[in-house]
Amino acid sequence: MRWGISFKASLSGKFLLSYLLIVLVGVATLLAVTFALAPTLFQAQLVPILQTHPGALTTTEASQRILGDFLGTLLSALAVAAIAATVTSLATSLFVARRITVPLRQMTQVSQRISAGHYAERIVVAPVHATDELGQLASSINALAVALEQTERRRLEVIGNVTHELRTPIATLEGYLEGLLDGVIEPSPRTLAMLHTEAGRLRRLVDDLQELSRAEARQIPLSLQPLAPQRLVQNALEPLEGQFAEKGLELQIHLPENLPPVIADPARAVQILTNLLVNALRYTPAPGKVELAVSHEEDTVAFRVTDTGVGLTQEQLAHIFERFYRVDKSRSRALGGSGIGLTIAQSLAQAMGGEIRVESAGLGQGSSFTLTLPQAHA
Ligand code: ADP
């Protein structure tokens, strides 16, 4: 048998043997019942004959001969019938077994190919198995293949993106260092500061990547506790207020007093708010305005950061939380962004039972990012 399974151990072998046993038991029963009933039935038939033709069976030998003839005929007919029954039963069981083993073999082959890395392989389910256990098993294997294919695609995407992100700062560092070695570039404080900036960019990128992988794998330990929204806003704003003023951006805060506490990790919630505020600061040219409004929405508290900045198109809104997504790559990179900040922020928000929503009326119309965190119940 293929795949090293002996015929007896294979599903079709088991089916065939069990069907054969059933057939044999059936035939034995057939014969036993015939032997037991036939004489009685025969005699029951004979009595009326004797009553109408009293001279027909005058001797015991004559009646035994007729009985013997009758049984012989019956048994030959039964023997032929039993052989025919065995052959047809075997053919039927073979057909039934094949209907089960053929798709199972196909599933084994396809799953072996999937495990060997051919993630595009799929099992074709015959209509007859569309709803039975075999069909369900095939659908599960197909769903597994889809999930593996998506994971593999994401993995390749991440490797491609990381390689691309690392190439630029490494090339800059290499260029400067070569220039310094060849004596083409002076080791001036400005050059050294440039090298330091590029090295810092590399370090930030590596830190972001580590944070991203931990956030996506839900491996960032969270210390969830009831927190006053006012405290979160204060902690996020304090280090940034000066930068808004420096850039010439107006900063407005709407923080009602009667807000319920939220359940969140204090450091991570502040990290998300900081991220949204820093983005608003980055992508809003002066003169402009950034507003942070906190409100109570059903079971959540919403922290809404609205700016009068560059805004986003519908297409950009759809991709904004994807890893490494940046609207203006060179500009964002020059501003120190790697396009991972919002992906990490969204992962963290979701891990705390909240989310980040984004809205924008279009390019040049400003944008609005809302962090929602679950309200703490007494
Ligand atoms: P980055 O570190 O590059 O800023 P983010 O993940 O924080 O990465 O943001 C991804 C992209 O989303 C940014 O590159 C920028 O194009 C866009 N973006 C984020 N915040 C804003 C905003 N407030 N206004 C306009 N565009 C924004």
Image: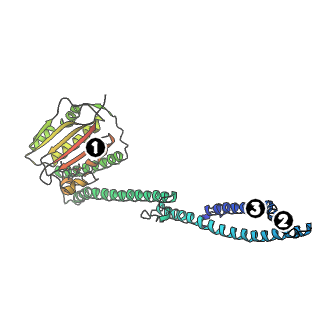
Cβ of disc 3 within 8 Å of ligand 1? Answer: no
Density class for disc 2 (Cα within 10 Å; few <14, some 14-19, many ≥20) is: few
- Please state the horizontal and vertical placement of residue 353, each as a whole percent of the image: 32, 40
Precedes in sequence: disc 2 or disc 3: 3
Q: What element carries label 1?
A: strand
Q: Residue 51 shows which numbered tag?
A: 2
Q: Is mark 3 on a helix, strand or loop?
A: helix
Give the Cα separation between the discs numbered 3 and 1.
72 Å
Which kind of residue does numbered mark 3 sit on?
Answer: Ala
| Residue at 36% across, 45% down | 214
Label 1 or label 2, whichever lies nearer to me, is: 2
Mark 1–mark 2 contact, CB under 8 Å? Answer: no
Could you tell whether 69 is left or right of 96 in the image?
right
Say if residue 187 shows up in the picture: no
Precedes in sequence: disc 1 or disc 2: 2
Residue 37's place in the image compared with 212, above or below, is below
Which kind of residue does numbered mark 1 sit on?
Answer: Glu
| Residue at 32% across, 49% down | 209
Label 2 or label 3, whichever lies nearer to me, is: 2
Quarter of the figure with residue 231: top left
Density class for disc 3 (Cα within 10 Å; few <14, some 14-19, many ≥20) is: few
- Please state the horizontal and vertical placement of residue 6, each as a whole percent of the image: 65, 63
Can you say which quadrant of the picture contains the C terminus?
top left
- Residue at the top extreme, as displayed: 378
Quarter of the figure with residue 220: top left
Which residue was labeled with disc 1? 355
Which residue was labeled with disc 3? 28
Can you say which quadrant of the picture contains the N terminus?
bottom right
Which kind of residue does numbered mark 2 sit on?
Answer: Gln
